[in-house]
Amino acid sequence: MSKLSPKSLCRNYTLTQIETKITFYEEQLDAATVRMYDKDTSQGRQKVESADIEKIESLLQTWLAAKECKSGVGGTQIVHGNFRAGNRGAIV
């Protein structure tokens, strides 16, 4: 899976949708503390393996960064074009 971009998530999702995803991944992170368990009852056997904690944490961080972007609390980003200089297009 390719890496999600917080800026593209910020552009394509509403704040409510982003908060829903954050809640989902927080619940998944809490549930992933148990790596694997095997439950055997008289009705059958159930083997459960939780998702990889690092992957869940990475996705959660991406959605949290998208929330910062959408909420406007992530700080400013200053872009300088330097259109008056004679060397337009050069890296300054």
Image (cartoon, helix red, strand yellow):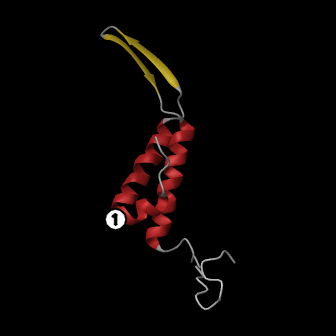
Q: Quadrant of residue 81?
A: bottom right
x and y percent of residue 21 in the render?
39, 52
**26 or 3: nearer the viewer:** 3
x and y percent of residue 12 in the render?
35, 62
Q: Residue at x 51, y 23 (%)?
A: 36
Q: Residue at x 50, y 54 (%)?
A: 62
Q: Residue furthest right?
A: 92
Q: Residue at x 61, y 86 (%)?
A: 82
Q: Left of 35 or right of it: where is 10?
A: left
Q: Quadrant of residue 45?
A: top left
x and y percent of residue 11 in the render?
39, 66
Tag 1's secondary structure? loop
Q: Which residue, given by chain and number where applicable, does mark 1 sit on?
A: 14
Q: Residue furthest top?
A: 42
Q: Is residue 25 above or below residue 42?
A: below
Q: Left of 89 or right of it: where is 49?
A: left
x and y percent of residue 26 in the render?
47, 48
Q: Is residue 33 above or below residue 42?
A: below
